[in-house]
Structure formats: C-alpha cells, structure tokens
Image (cartoon, rainbow, N blue to C red):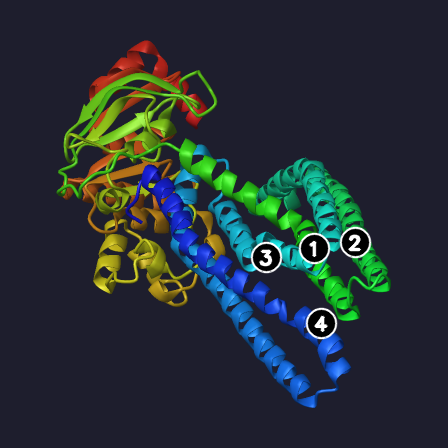
Amino acid sequence: MKVNQNEKLLSLKKALNACKKAFYYSLLFSFISNLMMLAIPIYSLQVLDRVISSASIETLVMLTLVAFLALTCLSLIQGVRSFVMIKLGSWLDKRMSPVLFAHGIANSAYKRTISSGQHLQDMASIKNFITGQAMSSLLDAPWSMIFIIFLFFIHPAIGIVSIIGGVFLFIIAIMNEFSTKSAIESAGEHSIKSSSYADTAARNAEAIEAMGMLENVTKIWQESNTKSMILQEHAGRKSAIYSSITRFFRLAVQVGVTGVGAYYVLQAQMSVGAMIAAGILVGRALAPFETAIGSWKGFISARKSLKRLTQSLEHSPVRASSIELPEPKGNISFENVYFAPMGTKKPTISAVNFKLNAGDVLAVIGPSAAGKSTIAKLLTGVWQPASGNVRMDGADVYNWRRDNFGKYVGYLPQDVELFAGTIKDNISRMNSDATDEEVIEAAQLANVHELILRLPEDYKTNIGLDGMTLSAGQRQRIGLARAYFGNPKLVVLDEPNSSLDNEGDMALMRAIQNGKKRNITTVIISHRPAILQVADKVLLMSEGKIADFGDRDTVINNMREKGVLPKLKAVQG
C-alpha cells in the first residue's frame, strides 16, 4: 500500500474516529432496546394490579399485544445493533489489516523483532471485542439508570437500595480491573514470545531433528508457555472470584429489593405488582455490571492490542512521502554513511563513501562481520542510515516509494526464501499480471531457464511452502531469476553462490555478465574470491570501514602487496 508509517498511524486513528458514528448509533439502539425492556416489568405491574382486580379480559389482551409488540421491537433493535457491531468489526478489519500487514513486513525487515502476524492478531483481538458480548454490556451499562429511575418512581427506598447495589458492583469492577490487568497483559506478552519461539523452531526443524535439539528447544519454549498459562490461570481465578462476588451482590440486591417491596406491601404503601416489577427492574439494571466483569479479560486484551499497534506505528522509522520518480539509470552513491542496529550504539559501518556508475559491477568483500550485508540492506532501502545518505541517481533510496523503487531493483538476500506457489509466481514477484515472456526473459537472463524446464511442470511447478520441494541451490537460482525480473537498473546479490555447485557458479557468472551488457548496476556480496573475475570494481570492508575501493586490478594488487589476499583465501576457501 502506498502509505508511509505516519500515514499508517493516521489511518488507524482515522479508522477509529470513523467508528465513533457507528458507536453513537449503537448507543442509540441500546437506549431504545433498554426502553423496550421496560415492557416486561410494566406488563407484570399492570396485569397484577389492574387486570386481576378488574377481571378485564379486554385489558389483558390489549396489554399482552402491546408487550409482544415491544418485545418484537426489542429483538429487532438488538439484532440491528449486533449487525452494526459485526459490520463495524469487519469494516475495521478490512480497512486496517492490509495496512498492518504491510507495516508488519516493513517492521520485521528493519527490526527483526515482531512479525506481521502479531499485528493481525492484535487487529483480530480488537475486532473480537467489538463484536463480542463485552461491547454489548458496555453499551447497555449507561442505560441502567433508566431502570434505576423507574425504581425510584415505584418507591424511593427501592431506588436507594438499587443505587447502593450499583455502587458496590462498580467498585468490584474497578477492583477486578486493578487485580487482573497486570496478569492478563503479562500473559499476553509471554504468549506472543512463546508463539514467536515456536515459529523460529519450526523454521529450524531440520537442524533440531538432525542434532537432537528437540528436548532443549521444547524446554525453552515450555518455560515461556508455562509462564503464560500460570498468569492466565492466576487472572482467571481472580476474575472468577470477582464474578462470583458480583453475582452474589446482584442476587442479594434483588432479594433486598423484593424484601423491601414486601415490607411496603404489608404497610399498604406498594402494590404486589409494583413489588414484582421492582424485582425484574433491579435485575435488569445490574445485569450489565455482572456481564462486563465476566468479559473484562477481552476488554483488557483489546486495549493492550490497540496500545501495542499504536506504539508500533509510532516508533517505527518513517519513510518520507515521495512522488513516483522516473526510471533511474543506476548511478549509486554512498555519502558518509553510518549505521548502527536498533538498540545498539556501536556502528556496524561508519564513514562509508563510494560511487558507482550505471552498469558497474562491484564486488564487496571482506572478513565476517565487516559490514558487507549491511551495505546490501542499505543499498536496497531496507535499512535507514543513522547518518549520511545512500542515493540512486540522486534520490535517497530509503525514502523512495517502495512500489516505485522495487520496479528498478533486484535483490537476492543471503537467506533465500520463496513463497508457496509456482516457479512463475516466484520469479514474477507474485505479480499475477506478469506475462510468460517476462518470466522466461528473467529466467534466461539468470541462466536458470533450462533448469526450470527439467522440473516436472516447468514454470507451473508448485514448489510448496518456502520452496521446500527445491534444493538449496535451486532456490538460490530461482531467487536470482526473481532479482532479474522486470529489467531492473540495480541488482544486489548477497552471497549469491553460497549454495551453488560448479554449474550454478558458471551460470551466476554469465548472468552477471549478461546484466552488464544491459547496463545493470550490480553489487555482489561474497566470501569467494572467484567472483572478482566478473567485477569492475572492488570494495574491501574491514571492521565496518572501507579498507580499499577502486578498480578491480588496482585493489587486488594492493591486497597482494599488503598480504591480505592470501588471508582472505585461507578464510574463504
């Protein structure tokens, strides 16, 4: 979606503000439905006090018809209110889920902490609260005063008893909030942590099985999961206690109202019908408090989910909004770039300056942890420099609108991950409008066309989840074709030959040479010195700084003179 982080936060606030109108309508429906609920106590009052004493069948029939009409209206209004809340929840989900999904992907790429799935789970929690019983109870609660006012009309003493009961129930609700809030929120955090760990374990299932790590991994997961269960159980026990206390007080107040009513009946200050009606009214007046306390866990979870979403949107890095820029040539410049991962002060790269002309092939080499992959992520706009700028044709790549920027860039990450679908789907970057010719052109450019033709259904072969039906080398070569899809102007390859055999290595070399003929700027991150033979320029990184940069032959000669090249060969094999 074409929105940056500020716009995403604004989208959430606008969506919540747009919900207000529906809430006002729902409050109105709640008011009308609570008025309709007066039909039962009024009917009981009239039947006992007027019909029985007058023995009037006509009055009984008329009152019954009116009561049925009121109940019909009540059912219709409550149904409409439920439909409004369901529609509201679905609308909010439909409007925000794509925004949150996109934000989650961008956030995961930048921080590697929280998945887009958690944002969607938070959205589902809010939706479930809106469409659930807890929201209905909250909408009904303000109108309890209607019944209490009616109780005062029956007799002031009964009204006072009901108010005292309501105050007690409100105090219990506040106590329940303070007592369970911390446990419920902590349980939720531990649940997220255990789910995240389970996802990580699933992605590393082969290593776990091969090295017998299952018991150790399970133990770590179970610690977090057990903490969540203990906290949920703790909160559940407290909530159950408060629910029982609430039910006791509500029933006690009903008994008290009936007792007070009976006393005034004996004193000839109240009719039997009024006493029965008072018992019904007080039960209805206090019911929302009991239901709300029983549903309080959902309210706390929804509130925490909303807070988590808001904080995530507020604290994520913001991409400056941008118009759609024209097609670039592929000129690259790093301008005094520094970068430090979130939560750390030590930069992984510092004072990086270099320039590439369109069509240049740059090999970025150096020992492990030298900052090579950081260069790749900054160059593709996945990460934002702490200071300095990374530019393509003068435009800041981080602030370049993603859908526009992506058309001109190909990227093969160090860990190649493919999507469930066909070979064609993956090469075309999941673009359903891509033509067969465009996909085949990318595959031919990456020298993987013949490999694909040997698969059971060539380009229509379904590769399964994460490309599980393919070997690591095949996945890497399909990822290379994906990088070349759409005739990009810049291709960044992070360890592109880590899983390749000799045939794959040769195909990679030819692909880079083919790209150069098309004037594609190519940046290769690699530990293998063999890749240097297709490079025009070499960037040697050491401890996050540029140790050398220039034409390939010049840098290689400098490395040999300093004795660096033999060391690299020893490390890199």
Question: Which residue is labeled 1 in the image?
Answer: 286
Check disc 4 and report the residue beneath it: 45
Instruction: Kindly tell me whether residue 212 is visible in this rendering.
Output: no
Q: Farthest residue to the top: give it.
A: 562
Q: Residues within 10 Å of mark 3 (few under 14, many from 20)?
A: many
- Measured Cα–Cα span from mark 3 to mark 4: 23 Å
- Which corner quadrant of the image does residue 135 belong to? bottom right
Name which of mark 2 and mark 4 comes first in the sequence.
4
Q: How many marks?
A: 4
Up/down of 7 relative to 275, above or below: above
Q: Residue furthest front?
A: 268
Which part of the image, by quadrant, shows the C terminus? top left
Query: x%, y% of residue 554?
Result: 21, 18
Q: Amino acid at mark 1?
A: Leu
Q: Which of the two marks, 2 or 4, is nearer to us in this view?
A: 4
Lateral position of residue 328 relative to residue 426, left or right: left
- Determine the residue positioned at 48% across, 46% down: 119
Q: Are marks 1 and 3 in contact (CB under 8 Å)?
A: no
Which residue position holds label 2?
253
Residue topped by disc 3: 140
Are the residues flagged by discs 2 and 1 in contact, CB closer than 8 Å? Answer: yes
Whichever of callouts 3 and 4 sits on the residue coming sooner in the sequence is 4
**Foreground of the two, 40 or 139:** 40
Viewer-nearest of discs 3 and 4: 4
Badge 2 marks a residue whose secondary structure is helix
